[in-house]
């Protein structure tokens, strides 16, 4: 990414290009994932989205036409690919952000770009941080985005549909014995998620229990020996076909694992299980259906 001058110089340029600061008493006020109250004088019309899940969610509630800038990974729906790129979670192109004249930035609250976001916020650009950690929180984020964009009716409809589908998945798998799973999200280093993570919360819909739920870090990095010691009956791999094939080969080297012996190595497209959108439930349904063959049968009523 092209960088010119110091951050201070670019921020000075931004102060000349961005809209005037919002009045103290805003017409819209919504709390973000950090608890910060974000105030807008009117529904946002020019939004810069800084995470693919955020971009997807904005399109989902009917606010896609208002997304004037997005991070490099925003690739769904297809229309999102035409949105100008402004960088990624590690670094933003501040000049590009300024040229787009946003009245709202929506960002994931992690990554090296946080210092840049603080600078943009100090210049009067509202920044909304988004990190839903459950199906219910995703529905809440839909409603928040609806308020911020003036699309509340469409957002509420999508939120209700999301929650209804989650209830159906839970009902379809009700009464079955829980199944312990290891969730792999990366290979080098081996990386998983803990019980507070959105993925773990979503998989609980069908009784899948993350063996690293009690880990302190949101994304622990255990070694394979630690996984082998817990010996989960199933392993869920968040990977595309080629990557999943390589990960499966790595696990098959540990033939003593019951998940390997049973062939319970379940690969799910990460875009369908790691992005906080309605597509998350597609990934959950696929994972739950695949796990059904490796768990105890439903208990009698």
Image (tube, rainbow, N blue to C red):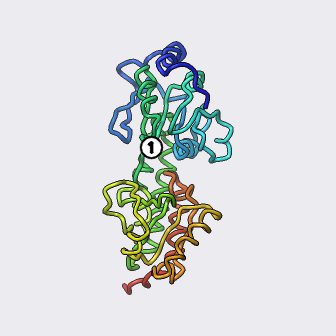
Say which of 80 and 189 sits in front. Answer: 189
Q: How many marks?
A: 1
Disc 1 target residue = 143
Q: Residue at x 45, y 24 (%)?
A: 120
Q: Position of residue 220 (x, y in %)?
A: 39, 58
- Name, please, the residue furthest toward the top: 16
Q: Position of residue 60 (x, y in %)?
A: 57, 46
Q: Residue at x 48, y 78 (%)?
A: 259
Q: Position of residue 92 (x, y in %)?
A: 53, 31
Secondary structure of the residue carrying numbered label 1: helix
Check the image and report above or below for 42 versus 76: above
Check the image and report above or below for 222 versus 147: below
Q: Position of residue 71 (x, y in %)?
A: 57, 38
Q: Say which quadrant the C terminus sits in.
A: bottom left
Give the quarter of the image for residue 82. Answer: top right
Q: Say which quadrant the N terminus sits in.
A: top right
Q: Is residue 101 left or right of residue 113?
A: right
Give the quarter of the image for residue 193. Answer: bottom left
Say which of 13 and 135 sits in front. Answer: 13
Query: Mark 1, residues whose alpha carbon is within 10 Å: few (<14), some, or many (≥20)?
Result: many
Q: Residue at x 57, y 35 (%)?
A: 87
């Amino acid at each position: 990414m092209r960088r010119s001058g110091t951050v201070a110089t670019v921020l000075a340029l931004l102060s000349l290009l961005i809209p005037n600061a919002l009045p103290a008493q805003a017409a819209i006020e919504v709390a973000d994932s950090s608890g910060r109250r974000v105030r807008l004088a009117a529904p946002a019309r020019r939004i810069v989205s800084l995470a693919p899940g955020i971009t997807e969610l904005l399109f989902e509630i009917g606010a896609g036409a208002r997304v004037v800038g997005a991070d490099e990974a925003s690739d769904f729906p297809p229309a999102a690919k035409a949105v100008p790129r402004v960088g990624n979670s590690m670094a933003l192109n501040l000049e590009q952000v300024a040229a787009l004249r946003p009245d709202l930035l929506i960002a994931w609250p992690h990554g090296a770009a946080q210092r840049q976001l603080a600078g943009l916020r100090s210049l009067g650009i509202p920044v909304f941080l988004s990190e839903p950690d459950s199906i219910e929180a995703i529905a809440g984020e839909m409603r928040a985005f609806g308020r911020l964009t003036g699309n509340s009716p469409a957002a509420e409809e999508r939120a209700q549909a999301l929650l209804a589908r989650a209830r159906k998945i839970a009902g379809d798998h009700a009464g079955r014995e829980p199944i312990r799973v290891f969730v792999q999200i990366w290979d080098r280093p081996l990386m998983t998620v803990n019980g507070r993570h959105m993925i773990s919360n979503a998989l609980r819909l069908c009784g899948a229990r993350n063996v690293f739920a009690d880990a302190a870090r949101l994304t622990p990095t255990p070694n394979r020996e630690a996984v082998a010691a817990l010996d989960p009956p199933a392993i869920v791999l968040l990977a595309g076909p080629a990557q999943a094939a390589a990960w499966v080969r790595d696990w098959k080297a540990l033939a003593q694992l019951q998940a390997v012996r049973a062939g319970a190595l379940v690969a799910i497209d990460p875009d369908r299980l790691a992005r906080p959108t309605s597509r998350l439930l597609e990934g959950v349904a696929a994972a739950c259906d695949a796990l059904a063959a490796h768990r105890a049968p439903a208990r009698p009523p």
